[in-house]
Amino acid sequence: MELKIENTKAQMRKGVLELCVLSIISEKEVYPSDIIKKLKEAKLIVVEGTLYPLLNRLKNADLLDYSWKESLSGPPRKYYHITPHGQGFLSELMTTWEELNTAVYRSTSKNQ
């Protein structure tokens, strides 16, 4: 069986998606389409079908919460914000990411 590079790249992006979403939401209260826009700008392509289940999982884990806000262009919108528990979780994820990033760099660097 042949490995497809696109599958591997997609799995790598999925692995950091939770970290990126929590980090984006920790900056300010945010609407899901704004999260998608920011992730696309960062080349972490995400569609609503991927984001909404993740937001629900994070909400159910008490890492996120949301509030409804009136919209000028339609029905009220759900805006997400990070909870205190989510802040602690994000902090631990960031530490793990920094350690992992350093380990990957060290193991893949050709100038050792």
Image (cartoon, helix red, strand yellow):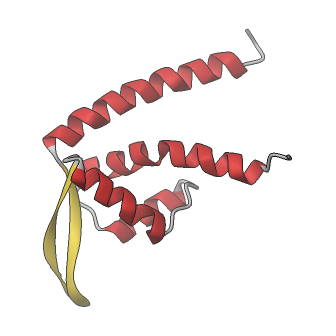
Residue drawn 34% across and 67% down?
Answer: 32
* Horizontal side of residue 81 vs 50, given as left or right: left
Residue drawn 57% across and 48% down?
Answer: 13
* Horizontal side of residue 89 vs 41, given as left or right: left
Q: Is residue 92 above or below residue 106?
A: below
For this orientation, the residue located farthest to the bottom is 74
Residue 80 horizontal/vertical position (percent): 23, 61
The quarter of the picture where residue 91 lies is: top left
Q: How many marks?
A: 0
The quarter of the picture where residue 75 lies is: bottom left
Residue drawn 49% across and 42% down?
Answer: 16
For this orientation, the residue located farthest to the front is 1
Q: Is residue 84 above or below residue 10?
A: above
Residue 108 horizontal/vertical position (percent): 71, 22
Q: Is residue 20 above or below residue 91?
A: below
Q: Quadrant location of the C terminus?
A: top right
Residue 82 horizontal/vertical position (percent): 21, 49
Residue drawn 38% across and 25% down?
Answer: 95
For this orientation, the residue located farthest to the right is 2
